[in-house]
Amino acid sequence: MSNHQITTKQKGDACEMLIAAKLTLAGIPALKVPDNWPHYDVIAQPQNGQPLRISVRARTYKPGAAYVGYLETEDFDWLAIVTLPGGSETERRFFLIPRKLADRTARRDAATSKTAKERYWRVDEVLKIFSRFENNFSLNPFLKPNEEALKLIEARRRQKTQPAARRIS
């Protein structure tokens, strides 16, 4: 069966199972919750702590206008982003990010827009901003994002939102 015959739901379910399996093999038992469970997809139980709720998002890699995100109203502790091969990317990649950091670094639209509750990044930005969180199956919350990449991306965003200078004749 080729990837083109796999539905989006099947890809999403497979990525949720991959996250649960990789966490378990890293020493943090985890399982996929039933379909349509509100807010998160995987529950993980660290040895010394409370269960952690993980929301899994999967996207095929594509540079430019391809986005991955979540709703601010969703209740989870960690965000797992799985990038699937596409474009120049030939491997699956896994990024496990604490919710507080996701909230701090995500793009958000104006409070008056229909999409005001969405938090998102371009898929190619995820690979740069969260490079230190790749394969973070120990769920280490103390890693830091790539601040240089974050600053460059923020500067580009500001340039695009500034009004064009007017010429005075």
Image: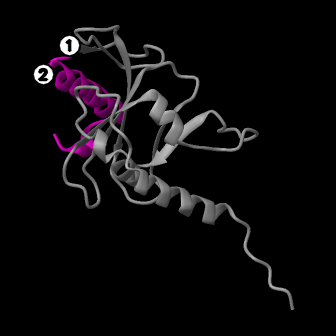
- Residue 161 x, y percent position in the rendering: 67, 61
Q: Is residue 154 visible in this depiction of the protein?
A: yes
Q: Residue at x 20, y 13 (%)?
A: 29
Apparent side of residue 82 relative to residue 152 in the rendered image (left or right):
left
Label 1, secondary structure: give it: loop
Q: Residue at x 41, y 56 (%)?
A: 149
Amino acid carrying label 1: it is Pro
Identify the image quadrant of residue 138. Answer: top left
Q: Is residue 34 visible in this depiction of the protein?
A: no
Task: Give the overall secondary structure of the magenta segment.
Answer: helix
Q: Is residue 1 above or below residue 38?
A: below
Q: Relative to the observer, which residue lies in front, 155 or 164?
A: 155
- Residue 158 x, y percent position in the rendering: 62, 60
Quadrant (top left, top right, bottom left, bottom right) of the C terminus: bottom right
Identify the image quadrant of residue 21. Answer: top left
Q: Residue at x 27, y 10 (%)?
A: 45
Q: Relative to the observer, which residue lies in front, 1 or 56?
A: 56
Q: Which residue is mark 2?
A: 25
Q: Relative to the observer, which residue lies in front, 84 or 107?
A: 107
Apparent side of residue 118 relative to residue 122 in the rendered image (left or right):
right
Q: Gap between marks 2 and 1, in whole Å?
A: 8 Å
Label 2, secondary structure: give it: helix
Please give the range of residues in magenta. 1-29
- Residue 107 x, y percent position in the rendering: 56, 45
* Residue that protrudes farthest toward the right in the picture: 169
Apparent side of residue 72 relative to residue 69 in the rendered image (left or right):
right
**150 inside magenta stretch:** no
Q: Which residue is mark 1?
A: 29
- Binning the other alpha carbons within 10 Å of mark 1 as few (below 14), some (14 to 19) or many (20 upward) gives some
- Residue 59 x, y percent position in the rendering: 36, 43
Apparent side of residue 148 relative to residue 24 in the rendered image (left or right):
right
